[in-house]
Image (cartoon, rainbow, N blue to C red):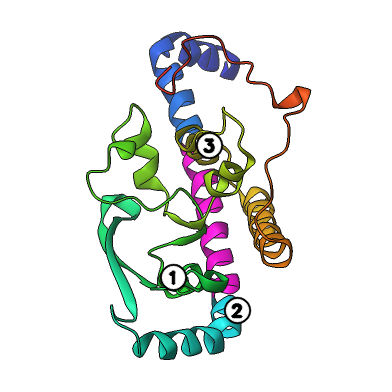
Amino acid sequence: MQNAKQTAVRRTTHPATATAARAAARAAGFAAAHLAAMTAKRSLDLVLGSALLALTSPALAVGALVLAFRPGGVLRRDIRTGLGGRPFELRSLRTRRLRLDLLSRLPHVVRGELSLVGPAPLAPGDPAAEGQGCRNWRQELRPGLTGLAQVRARSGMPWDEPALLDAYYAEHHGTGLDLAILAQSVRIQLRTALRGPARRSKAHLSDTDHRPPGYSVAE
């Protein structure tokens, strides 16, 4: 009798209802995974960002003191678009020596306006944020202190276009990739400080641009 009732229930269940239920379950699973990833990313920003700010505070204080005696002021102020499309004022020291301008943005990381790793912070109305498919993920990710586009742009490869790299990061971002990008950023800065700017060498076979003629970012 019980089996007959179960069979009757299954027969009366509309296929569209079952499909909608499966789609809702997948969407809920994706949302939960996305929330967990963003929580882990924010935790990394808070812990590592606070530690870096504490370590670099003496150098930042000295840099600010030196700039106070120079014309132009201590800080550079720019309006940038952050999480959810909300604008914020990005403050940086007016010097690139020892990348103090970059390190001076660490308070934005601690406050949650920036992430340690993410797409470059863009000004409101920047055309790079208006491309097809860009608007959604740019609103879902905090801009970064550094990012995949920043570390790969130095490679000189013709396919390492910032728009492509930012889109790739938006799709594959995670703690492992963030740590790899941070390590590469530190490696680049140390190499530049110790050896000077790297000279561009001849391209190897793997450096060849294999994209078809007429390729564009919009494809």
Residue ID for mark 1? 105
In this view of the protein, which residue sits in the foreground, 192 or 116?
Answer: 192
Residue drawn 53% across the image and 72% down it: 97
- Quadrant where the N terminus sits is top right
Badge 3: few (under 14), some or many (20 or more) residues near its Cα, within 10 Å?
A: many
The kind of secondary structure element at disc 1 is loop
Residue drawn 54% across the image and 79% down it: 53
Q: Which one is in front in this view, the residue at disc 2 or the one at disc 3?
A: 3
In this view of the protein, which residue sits in the foreground, 21 or 77?
Answer: 77
Q: What residue occupies the far right of the structure in this picture?
A: 205
Q: Height in image: 135 above or below 79?
A: above
- In whole angstroms, how far apart are the C-alphas of marks 1 and 3? 22 Å
Residue 108 falls in image quadrant: bottom left
**Looking at the image, is mark 1 or mark 3 earlier in the sequence?**
1
Residue ID for mark 2? 51
The kind of secondary structure element at disc 2 is helix
- Quadrant where the C terminus sits is top left
Picture coordinates of residue 8, whole percent (x, y):
48, 11
Tag shown at residue 165: 3
Residue drawn 50% across the image and 45% down it: 34
Picture coordinates of residue 77, whole percent (x, y):
28, 69
* Stretch in magenta: 28-49
Q: Are marks 2 and 3 in contact (CB under 8 Å)?
A: no
Question: What is the three-letter code of the residue carrying label 1?
Answer: Arg
